[in-house]
Every structure is written in C-alpha cells, then in structure tokens.
Amino acid sequence: MMDEYSIDHQRRLKRIQQKMEEWNLAVYLGSRLRTLSYVGDVFCPWRSFIIIPQEGEPIIYTFIIDAERVRDESWLDDVRGFGPLGGGHQLDVLTDAITDCLTGGKAKIGVELGLSNYLPEGYLTTEEYNYLTKKLPYAEFINSIDIIDEISMFKESGEINRFRKASEIVDLGHKAVLEGLEIGMTETEIAGLADYAMRKAGSEWAWSFTGGNEIASGYRTSYPMGACTPATRRPIYAGEPLMVDLHAMYKLALGDHAHNYLISPVSRTQKMHAKYFLETITRVLDLYAPGMTPAEIADNIMDWADLRGFAQYLVPGFEHGIGLMGDEWRIGMNDGPLPYWTNPDHIYKENMMLICAMQYMAPEDHVGFRYEGPIVITKKGCEVLPKTPLEVTVLS
C-alpha cells in the first residue's frame, strides 16, 4: 500500500539496471551499507551483499541468523542466508549466485571498492576481492560505485518525507532535553532523555557511528576540529556550554541535528562566541542553493569571518553527506580520487540532500558550538528539515 513515505523500488532498480547496461555490466555486487539500504530498503547490520542482475530482481545475502527478518522487512522476496550454521561459506554462495546470473563467456561484474572516513562503509575487503577473482577467473571486475552514488544523490518525494519525519523526531528529542535538563546530570543521562523521547516517537535506532547521541559539556565542546563526542559520565556544571547532537532513524532515513546551550551564569566571552556562531550558521544556510559548490560556500564564509576576526574558530567546510542508514557521500573540502566521496567543486542541484554542518571551537575559552541539520536543495535555496531554533539556548 502506497503512502507518503513510499519509494518506487522498481523504478529505482530499473535506473540502476539501465546504468549497468551503459557500463556493460552483467552483474552488480553491492557490499556497502548504503547500497543495501538504497536498493533493498531494509536494515542490514550484519555483513551482507546484494546481487543485482542485468535483468530480474536482486538477491540479498546476509548472515543466516538474520535472513528471515530481512526477508520479512524487505520488498525483495529473494533473501538468502550464509554462515557456519549450514548456510555455506559466504563467498562460495556468492560466487555460485553470480555464476547463475551470467549467460556464459567473459563477463563484467561491478563491485564496490574504495575508501571512507567511517568504519562500517562496507567496501569489499582484500580477502573478499582476491577470493572472488580467483573463483571467477573468466570475469572482469569493475569498480562501479559511481552508479549508486550518482543515482542516490537525488531524492524522490517519499524519501524526502522520511527524512522530514526523522527530523521531526529529533526535534522532539531536543524538546525533551530542554524540559528535563538539570544541573548535575551526566552526559549519558541527557542522551537518555532524548533517546527515550525519540523512541516513543518512532525512531528505530540512534544510528550514529560516533556513539549514538553525541553529548558534550564544558571543555569537551571545544575540541580542535570538532571531534566526535559520544556521551560520557561527566556531569554538567553551571557556567558551561553544552552541545546536544541527536540522531534518529525513520524507515532508514536519518535525522541528525545538533543544538547548543549555555548554562548560567553566562560570561561575556561566551555570549560573544554564541553571537558569532549564530551569525555564521545563518549565513551558511542562506548560501545553499542550486549552482553553489562546497568551495564557494567555504570561501565566502571564511573570507567573511576573517574580516570579522573569528575565522580561526571555524572548520573551513560546511557539509557532509546523509542517506539511508549511513552517510551517503561526504563532499568535503579535500579533493580526492572518488568523485562522490569528496569534491569541493561539486555543484548542488535541486532535490539533493546533505547535512549542513558547522563546527565553531574556541579551545582557549573552553567553549564550542556545533550545528548539523539535514537540508534539501530547492529551486532557489534550501529547506532546513529540523525546526529546533538556530539560536544558542541560555538555561538559567
């Protein structure tokens, strides 16, 4: 039954198979988390693979203990298990299934090779790649990650609605923190306040690979370059900054939003930094629009901040990727060998989605702020999905 969160899986598959035809690929072997989420539309936390033939429907392979659950939740009917419980060696069953998809003769097989700055990306390991090439000596293996990365950058309406819902859930998490926060609470308790509210609202997972909900207080808000800040047992004290970075998941779409607090008594220096932070993030969001690039936005902001005298507090990049169940791509400011992994000259287009991300750190003053929020590029600018205010909240 179609609803506002529905995705046209067959249309999505057809687009992938059309790209495969252009690349002359007989089979696409997806191993990345993003590919399994994007094509299978199902939560696959174990080492898993998806085999996409040139014609027909894909096959998901996952750890045998989870195969029945994946089959129940995915739109795909063909879900198979592997493992030491009678399901067969995972690479043997993969090569058998790939062989069944080939029509004979030398064939091109798309695989996913690359690098990433977060752990569970899912590229083929050296051992897996060597095993497959040995078992299938007649095949030519082509790194084909551009196919999924290009198609998945543009979001259809049901997918965007999932992200809107995930952001609504994160907003409820922030509301729970604001209403329940007390001096002396630990960072882990604050994370729990948010997580309980978000779970009640339908969040399936505090998805972040940086430790769930990230909470930082005091000097921990001002680590150089921003860091990741999994919640600790550190209590919060009066006179400190507090950063609350929450994560939710709704139908594999991810909510990711950071909000900042100053706990009274607030110093003049803290107020100054909060003012600079708000002015900067407001300007960043105003710059996002079709035709802009990460480099243009970064140059504009850093030149502007330099004239104001606080560029040294900013990380010179203002975005990262977001997708279904994991970062989809990271545009970043460092040019690299993979076109959808990092590219300062990437041109934003309508219906692309990313995280507007900003780190503001003043380590010498033990104060820092973070902003993260999913945005959709629109015809003339961007839509900010979370509705929690940009302003730093002062708690008395």
Image: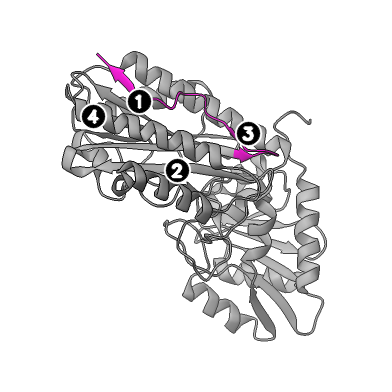
Given contact means CB atoms under 8 Å apart, are the residues at marks 4 and 3 in contact?
Answer: no
- Image spot of residue 301 (x, y percent): 44, 46
Range of residues picked out in magenta: 376-396
**Disc 3 designates what residue?**
162
Q: Which residue is mark 4?
A: 270
The crowding category of the residue bearing disc 4, from other C-alpha atoms within 10 Å (few below 14, some 14 to 19, many at least 20), is many
Q: Residue at x 48, y 28 (%)?
A: 170
Q: Position of residue 142 (x, y in %)?
A: 65, 76
Amino acid type indicated by mark 1: Val
Q: CA distance from mark 2 to mark 4?
A: 21 Å
- Using the rendered view, name the quadrant where residue 338 is placed: bottom right
- Assess whether residue 355 is covered by the magenta stretch: no
The quarter of the rendered structure image containing the C terminus is top left
Q: Which mark is residue 392?
A: 1
* Callout 3 crowding tier (Cα within 10 Å): few <14, some 14–19, many ≥20: many
Q: Relative to 151, is 210 on the left or the right?
A: left
| Magenta-drawn stretch contains 393 | yes
Q: Looking at the image, tell me whether mark 3 or mark 1 is earlier in sequence order.
A: 3
Front residue of this view, candidates 236 and 284: 284
Q: For this view, does 208 lie left or right of residue 77?
A: left
